[in-house]
Amino acid sequence: MVENNDPGSNKPTFFQILMSVVSAAIGVQKSEIRRRDFQSTSPLPFIIAGLLFTVFFIASILGIVFLIL
């Protein structure tokens, strides 16, 4: 097996970032996925996705509350 040391090879896909953020929000994540996330080149995509998920979650909760009231 040949390892690719290309700096862009550790770049996670959009779906991988999304699943990591959702898994972190729920509190369940495999250790191999966590290792992959920490080996990525930049934490910025995870921070942005986490902030967007938080805003979406709060807006959803507020929407449900206003719908019920």
Image (tube, rainbow, N blue to C red):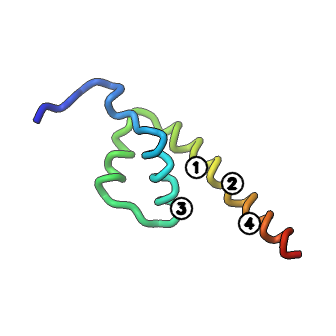
Secondary-structure class at tag 3: helix
Q: Where residue 38 sits: x, y (%)?
A: 37, 45
Which of the marked residues, 4 or 3, is nearer the chain's N terminus? 3
- Tag 3: Cα neighbours inside 10 Å, few (<14), some, or many (≥20)? few
Q: Nearer the viewer, residue 46 or 13?
A: 13
* Callout in the foreground (2, 3): 2
Q: What residue sits 32% from the left and 30% below the top?
A: 9
* Callout in the foreground (4, 1): 4
Q: Where residue 29 sits: x, y (%)?
A: 39, 61
The residue wearing badge 4 is 61
- Tag 2: Cα neighbours inside 10 Å, few (<14), some, or many (≥20)? few
Picture quarter with the N terminus: top left
Q: Is disc 3 in contact with disc 1, using a CB cutoff of under 8 Å? A: no
* Callout in the foreground (1, 2): 2
Q: Is residue 64 left or right of residue 3?
A: right
Which residue type carries mark 1? Gly
Q: Is residue 5 left or right of residue 18?
A: left
Mark 4–mark 2 Cα distance, whole angstroms, equals 9 Å
Q: Which mark is residue 50?
A: 1
Secondary-structure class at tag 2: helix
Mark 3–mark 1 Cα distance, whole angstroms, equals 9 Å
Which of the marked residues, 4 or 1, is nearer the chain's N terminus? 1
Q: What residue sits 34% from the left and 34% below the top?
A: 10
Image height of 14 relative to 69, above or below = above
Mark 4–mark 1 Cα distance, whole angstroms, equals 16 Å
Mark 1–mark 2 Cα distance, whole angstroms, equals 10 Å
- Tag 1: Cα neighbours inside 10 Å, few (<14), some, or many (≥20)? some
- Tag 4: Cα neighbours inside 10 Å, few (<14), some, or many (≥20)? few
Q: Which mark is residue 56?
A: 2
Image height of 9 relative to 47, above or below = above
Q: Which mark is residue 25?
A: 3
Q: Where residue 4 sits: x, y (%)?
A: 22, 28
